[in-house]
């Protein structure tokens, strides 16, 4: 499938945005939710259609070209490869889950529009074949949440969320803007037709002396977006105080990880090889520090936020190693963590709506009133932490073996991080669902209802997907096999020799 008769990718990008526009004309909240669920479902159907036609290892597919942006030379080309087709499916799946199963009290019309617009921007980011347009969609992903938080930033917690969001994410986009300008400047000066086209940039190559500054700027932008320590503070705040689902969708779409694999690693191989020890160290520290902070939380929402921070560190460390096992493990982990943790947050929000709090010190004994809630919370938790038979187990196992092959001692922090995350989850489960209800709150917790059918279906779907992909990870790994083999370096000493050979292999994508 090199090209598609129907512009499937263009339809996928436009559909959620058009759905958000339609919501502005819908008066009934219930009807607005039905419209949003329909739009998200159609986007997922289109994503499944693209996946069904996709041929692994065949280069950019389902391509569409819509000319150029006058004056800037930005090329309006769309396409998918093994990296973007998985990211596309994950984004569509998570959006549908959040829209369909989120608490009705939290899914007002403005939040539904923000979720759909965020999905549209994320899909555009994954599909475009021009770095300048990737920057446009990178920023566009932030705007719906920014506008929504700005409208609600009257109370102190919401004002803090807005301030944190602006400082960490909007300001964090400036380094990527600077990197894009540095990459496109030679093309603009020489009058190239597509100065920021990804294939054109790969063909021209980036001189080694310039790669260091560009990689540093990209890594700074990615650190903000992936909530890498010390740029992580926005994520727990946004999950606890921000609009429902938007922050979760932004981090679980893994646009920062995609930028590294799609742009930084193939375009800047010498700089990536030189700085990979530093990147790995930052990733390991982020994984461990996020795990420790998650253990110290009493708010379930913030606990999930710091677990996501820890997972971001694991993925970054896997990319830095750049051997086939660690790369495959890091990319699998992006899916393995996103699906169950999204389901876990849906259960957490359901608890918050029913009890009025997500504070574990005020909860307890919920298993009596919500056995299905407790069971799904437990299953989703172990699925996110690498229990045997889950996709997270496969991803962490590959990542660990990849690191053990080159730096055996470095694997120790990963094992310790996994153990701490396990303790965090068991502690949260015990304090929330087992034991005696907190003093003074027994009467309020006695009337808690179990999960509704739509909530059970969404949480169970996340759980089944995590276990099913863990038992049969082959199809998912084959989708990205070509990209992993193109980016990987078999031995650390051969990194410089192989960098040039890997570049052309990526150029076709």
Image (cartoon, rainbow, N blue to C red):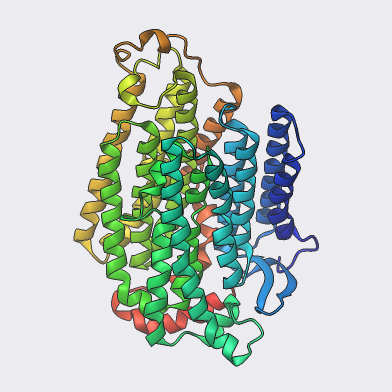
Which image quarter holds the C terminus? Answer: bottom right
Residue 351 x, y percent position in the rendering: 45, 24
Against 18, is 357 above or below? Answer: above
Which image quarter holds the N terminus? Answer: bottom right
**Residue 486 seen from this side:** no
* Residue, far left: 409
Quarter where residue 169 is shown: bottom left
- Residue drawn at point x = 61 percent, y = 68 percent: 133
Against 39, is 50 above or below? Answer: below
Quarter where residue 229 is shown: bottom left
Residue 41 in the figure: left or right of residue 83: right
Residue 4 x, y percent position in the rendering: 76, 64
Residue 79 in the figure: left or right of residue 275: right
How many marks on residues?
0
- Residue drawn at point x = 80 percent, y = 63 percent: 5
* Residue, far bottom: 190
Quarter where residue 53 is shown: bottom right
- Residue drawn at point x = 36 percent, y = 73 percent: 490
* Residue, far front: 154
Nearer to me, 46 or 227: 227
Against 6, is 200 above or below? Answer: below
- Residue drawn at point x = 25 percent, y = 43 percent: 292
């Amino acid at each position: 499938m090199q090209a598609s008769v129907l512009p499937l990718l263009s339809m996928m990008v436009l559909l959620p945005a058009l759905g958000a526009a339609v919501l502005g004309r819908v008066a009934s909240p219930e009807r607005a939710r039905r419209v949003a669920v329909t739009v998200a479902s159609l986007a997922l159907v289109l994503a499944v259609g693209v996946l069904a036609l996709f041929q692994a290892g065949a280069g950019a597919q389902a391509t569409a070209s819509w000319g150029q942006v006058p004056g800037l030379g930005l090329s309006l080309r769309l396409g998918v490869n093994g990296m973007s087709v998985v990211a596309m499916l994950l984004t569509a799946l998570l959006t549908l889950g959040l829209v369909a199963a989120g608490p009705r009290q939290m899914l007002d019309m403005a939040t539904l529009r923000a979720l759909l617009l965020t999905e549209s921007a994320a899909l555009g980011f994954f599909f475009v074949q021009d770095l300048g347009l990737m920057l446009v969609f990178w920023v566009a992903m932030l705007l719906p949440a920014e506008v929504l938080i700005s409208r609600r930033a009257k109370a102190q917690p919401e004002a803090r969320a807005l301030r944190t969001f602006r400082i960490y994410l909007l300001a964090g986009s400036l380094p990527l803007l600077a990197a894009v300008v540095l990459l496109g400047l030679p093309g603009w000066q020489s009058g190239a037709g597509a100065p920021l086209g990804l294939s054109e940039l790969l063909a021209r190559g980036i001189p080694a002396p310039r790669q260091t500054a560009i990689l540093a700027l990209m890594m700074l932008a990615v650190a903000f977006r992936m909530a890498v320590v010390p740029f992580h503070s926005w994520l727990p705040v946004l999950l606890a105080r921000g609009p429902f689902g938007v922050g979760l969708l932004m981090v679980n779409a893994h646009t920062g990880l995609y930028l590294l694999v799609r742009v930084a690693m193939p375009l800047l191989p010498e700089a990536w090889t030189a700085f990979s020890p530093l990147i790995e160290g930052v990733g390991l520290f982020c994984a461990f520090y996020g795990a420790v902070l998650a253990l110290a939380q009493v708010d379930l929402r913030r606990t999930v936020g710091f677990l996501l921070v820890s997972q971001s560190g694991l993925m970054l460390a896997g990319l830095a190693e750049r051997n086939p096992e660690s790369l495959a493990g890091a990319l699998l982990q992006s899916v393995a963590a996103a699906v169950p943790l999204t389901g876990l947050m849906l259960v957490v929000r359901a608890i918050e709506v029913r009890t009025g709090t997500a504070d574990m010190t005020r909860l307890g004994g919920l298993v009596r009133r919500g056995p299905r809630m407790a069971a799904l919370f437990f299953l989703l938790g172990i699925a996110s932490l690498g229990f045997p038979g889950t996709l997270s187990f496969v991803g962490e196992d590959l990542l660990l073996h990849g690191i053990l092959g080159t730096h055996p001692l470095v694997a120790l922090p990963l094992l310790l991080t996994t153990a701490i995350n396990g303790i965090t989850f068991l502690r949260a489960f015990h304090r929330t669902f087992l034991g005696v209800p907190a003093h003074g709150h027994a009467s309020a917790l006695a009337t808690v209802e179990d999960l509704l059918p739509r909530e059970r279906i969404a949480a169970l779907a996340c759980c089944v997907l995590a276990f099913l992909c863990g038992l049969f990870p082959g199809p998912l790994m084959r989708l990205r096999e070509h990209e992993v083999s193109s980016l990987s370096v078999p031995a650390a000493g051969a990194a410089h020799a192989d960098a040039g050979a890997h570049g052309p292999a990526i150029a076709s994508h």
